[in-house]
Image: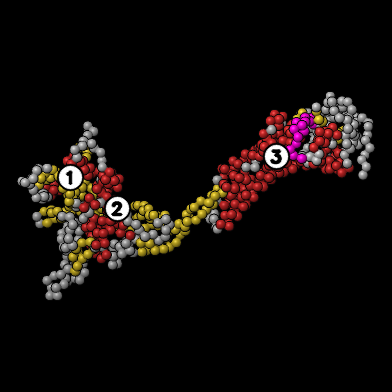
Amino acid sequence: MKPLQPNHKEPPKLQERHHQGVYRRRLISMIAFFLVGVLMCIGHHLYYTSLVGQVVGNVDDQQTALRYGTTFAYLAQVCLVTPVGFAYTQWLWKGLERKIVTVNALDAAFGARTSILSLLDAEILWKTRAGLILAFIVWCNLAPPLITPATLFVNPSLVPHYTMTAVPCFNISGPGQPERFAYSVPAKDSGANGLGANNLSGIFLGPRTIINRLSAATAAQGEILPIIPPFVNASYQLQFYGPTVDCQAANSSIAAIIDNKANELPALQGSVEFSNAYFAFVPYMSDSGYKAIPSNRLQQPTNGSNQLWMKFSAFVINSMGQQNPEPRYLVCQLYNASYNISLDFVEGHQTITNNSLLILNEVDYPQADLIAPSDLVQYAYSAVMWAFTDLLTGSMGFCNDKSPNSLSFAFSETNTPILDTSLLGTSDLDVIFDMCHALHSSSDSNTISGQRLHDIQLARNQTLDVLIPELAYNITLSFMSDSLLSPSITTNVTTQDSVNLYAYHSMKLLLSYGATIFFALIAIILAAFAYLDNGVSNDRSFSSILSSSRMPGLSEPFHAQLPLRLPLSPSLRFTRVEGGLSFNTASSRFTNTIEGESMAEGIFGRSSAGRKFKHDQLNILPARLLSAFRRIIRPSLAQGYIRITWTCVS
């Protein structure tokens, strides 16, 4: 097909400013991409929110959730980066208007969206700063797909389930249970058959060995013994009746009796006790008055009580702020109480919470009766108290050695099992350890030994009136570690299954998408301003690049390097170019002649009045290229002629 004959007539002069309109499809596309991107961001947030708290099934389920999240992030990125790219292209043409740049700078400007190194070109940094900012935003908006999918993560959690199952529960009064706590034998009388008139009569002889063993273990550890859980992770509540101990200060009459019993203690042979720092015993009333039952009672018929009397020396701070040892007296009594506890097991580790402990009534020591039926529950309660008091009775004091064949010296005397319990660290026994330190140490330092610090930590530095009831409480609950003493009952148990649940850092996703949306919106506003200011729409299509490079004068510097190959020669890279595109709506034919100074309106909508064009040759565009321009540029523009004014400047 032959090219059109050139028209040598002068094109009619244009007005100084003639806006040719905006390519609406491009502007609508920018807004549409932006809105779709915002919807993808919202959809990503809502999708992750819907997964929060759901159980992660298998590996495929977790990967599927991440795939969907990555898809949302990718679509959001594409839709929000595209309008920024449109804006950058428009500002690129605007930034190059009436500016002289080198070919190297043009390459960097057109490659800024595909190569981040192009942003480092000094000439572009100086001459197209606004467009460069948009190119930088394009690169920054690529970050959300790297951040947002990872905001969904898996959190190991425990999910509750409710079921009725068997759990151990303390039972001291159920059928056949008292015999598992107390040891007793049938009573006898002087009848012909040698048996009591009532076979239900018995004689209480003490606790079963299992009661002694569990009590001693609890007192040594200072905590409740491990209870077998129904599940590794479970929680439930129990209510039952059991023994407890409460301690109160002794009145003056009881204090006098305790002092008398303390003075009656026999000293070691050849020694004289000059200070009694701790003394505890089980009292009982005889015909001759109160008597003290020594520690480690034997399993034999004996009178006794369900009380523990004690005396000890404790520091009291006087009005001068000084610590002075003073005697204190306690009376501890056995009671029947109602327990309400919550048991929680996490990975087998137990936590027991005391919801309530209601003391109901005193429990007296059983008296031998050969006629009346025995109260076996009373036997069981008394057996627990027997084992409990055996842990605390005894004495601690200080003596002087008075043996005739030895030197006289002072020493401490201890004869009590409390040394083997967690109560040894009580602050009420500090006087004893301070006196021992003063007797056996030549140093005046009050430094506490490491062993004593460990004991204090175990007892939490509490007083005996607090620690003794706590120990009785712990012993009662420790009986639940044995199936004989705590048979199973069925109750509602909350099990905790270890599962992986979805969790979501919403703030990180919203901040990431929020910044991306904000910059994309700024880019759209700048693009709209550039469209209005330029008067026409531009892009980086082949037709746009081709139409701006058809002048022979512009192509002459490239002749030495045809076919074009990289890298460009230095002379070509630093060739300076001045750009613009003009058209005239008054003519429907293309012209290739530009003479002298002409009035031309550039593609950026600015007048070219007073511009000196270096070349006067313009190739005629083929019909197919013209058809492409009609699809790209508004139809009103396609009716005029287009004058390419890319010019090489010497």
Helix, strand, or loop for circle 1? strand
Q: CA distance from mark 3 to mark 2?
A: 72 Å
Quadrant in the picture for the N terminus = top right
Left or right? Give the position of 436 relative to 586: left
Q: CA distance from mark 1 to mark 3?
A: 89 Å
**Which of the numbered marks, if any, corresponds to residue 221?**
2
**Which is more N-terminal, label 3 or label 1?**
3
Tell me, what colour scheme is on the image?
A: secondary structure
Give residue 389's position: percent from left, percent from top. 21, 54
The residue indicated by pointer 3 is: 113
Does 568 lie within the magenta span?
Answer: yes
Give residue 369's position: percent from left, percent from top. 17, 65
The magenta segment is 565-582
Residue occupying the point 72% across, 43% down: 32
Quadrant in the picture for the C terminus = top right
Give residue 19's position: percent from left, percent from top. 82, 32
Residue occupying the point 54% across, 55% down: 56
